[in-house]
Amino acid sequence: MKIQNNNKSDVKGKITASRGIIYELNFENTLPPNGSILQITNDQHSRLMVLGYISETKAVALSIGGNTALSLGSFCELYKDKLEIPVGKSTLGRVFNALGETLDDSAAIKNQQTTPVEFNMDVKFGQAYSGEIIETGIKAIDFFAPFVKGRKIGIIGGAGVGKTVLVTELMHNVSQTGAGVSFFVGIGERIREAHELYENLKGANLLKESVMYLGQMNESAASRSMVGPTAAAAARWWRDNQKEDVLFFVDNIYRFLQARNELSIMLGEQPSEGGYQPTLFTDLVRFEDSLDSNENGSITSVQSIYIPADDISDPAVVEVYQQLDSVIVLSREVMERGIFPAIDLLATQSSLLSAEVVGERHFVLATQVQAILSKYNELRNIISIIGEGELSLNDRTDYQKAKRLVTYFSQHLFVAEPLTGNPGEYVSREDMLSGVEEILAGS
């Protein structure tokens, strides 16, 4: 049987089996293209996306609206060869779902441009930007995990340690630098958090340069798995057609993999040893590589990663970890000590913390600070047994410097002002380095 290319009227099918939101369809004359959108001929006009083929007459499709009430025997027809989403200046300040449909109460988008979404795209590697540093105003991040244009940064931690708060703070701070168009992609998180971010950006007059895509925890696995690639397609349009640098915030990339795993179970695929889908690595790499940079512009990605049961060895977490240039680790133990943001300064790592990227001054200071903090962790165990007074003079000096550094790298956040009453702080990279130098000098 041939696959449709031109005549949509030839593509007519019928649902013959279902498993959750996955459907098997039989076609009499022509199979629809892989990735095309089908429309059920019912009052709701429910839509399916073709995932692949079983035979020369049968295809597997996903209910992209999450509708599980489609009955066997329902008929469908081809709606679009590919999912297309709106792009352009008219989308700035707006909120969209995984299908590119607006979720806010603003007026409909008129005269909209569109771009197709490729869910199984072949990635063409572009230029990886490696030099220009983006200042965040957060001391611990700018010092230990500097943002570099075109690279990927992860914020990793268990439940309730402040991942979403830190992502929101970064979006608040970096958006004010005029570094380009900002995207926020909410995957599988609370609706309340997205609403608060929307209001914060609106109140700070930053929404006009931002676009939001949401597939939150109340939505189907289809929406949660599709919203990331959909937003990435829009980001690439801005990069290639408007020559804009893009800031791409994802909260939470683990929920994307979790949604893909749910779909894998519905498809009856054999899980891997860790309990995840057999395509875990492919799903992640395909998404991460779609956020590349080229001669037109850069896409700088910031992604929060949930750690299930605080187990950093979880297979999905390990796979995400390997895709990132910098990893900011949030610690429950640091949070319980009342230090915010609760960043584990030693566990936080970056391949970009080199003299070639951050400069000789910054690199030397980072080396000295990491040595003192490592010694501090060792001395804490000793002090708990014999007391600080039994340490040598040099050890006491280093211990006090380390305590000052830990305190120095804590910071009041702008997004936490309504809760704490403390005004937010923005510290420039130059002031941050000078502050560290003063502490190391014993000033």
Image: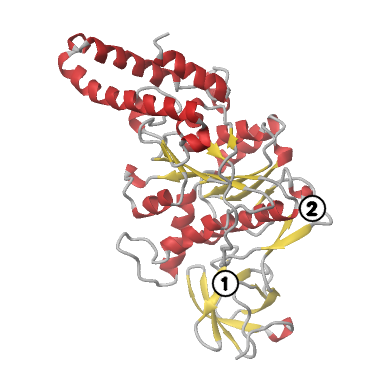
Is 359 displayed left or right of 322 in the figure? Answer: right
In the foreground, 373 or 75:
373
The number of numbered discs placed on residues in the rendered structure image is 2
The answer to which quarter of the image holds residue 415 is: top right
Q: Is residue 108 above or below residue 276?
A: above
In the foreground, 383 or 223:
383
Q: Which residue is mark 2?
A: 109
The answer to which quarter of the image holds residue 346 is: top left
Q: Position of residue 103 (x, y in %)?
A: 68, 50
Q: Check disc 1: other Cα within 10 Å, few if <14, some if 14-19, many if 20+.
A: some
Question: Quadrant location of the N terminus?
Answer: bottom right
Mark seen at residue 217: none
Is 380 displayed left or right of 99 in the figure? Answer: left
Q: Earlier in the sequence, mark 1 or mark 2?
A: 1
Look at 46% across and 36% down and name the residue there.
353
In the foreground, 437 or 63:
437
Q: Position of residue 404 (x, y in %)?
A: 39, 15
Depth-wise, is mark 1 or mark 2 nearer the camera? 2
Instruction: Tell me if I can see residue 54 in this picture.
Output: yes
Disc 1 residue type (three-letter):
Leu
Q: Which residue is mark 1?
A: 70
Q: Position of residue 118 (x, y in %)?
A: 62, 65
Is 305 displayed left or right of 399 in the figure? Answer: right
Q: Position of residue 59 (x, y in %)?
A: 54, 80
Q: Secondary structure at mark 1?
A: loop
Question: Quadrant location of the C terminus?
Answer: top left
Farthest residue in the right direction? 111
C-alpha gap between disc 1 and disc 2: 30 Å
Disc 2 residue type (three-letter):
Ile
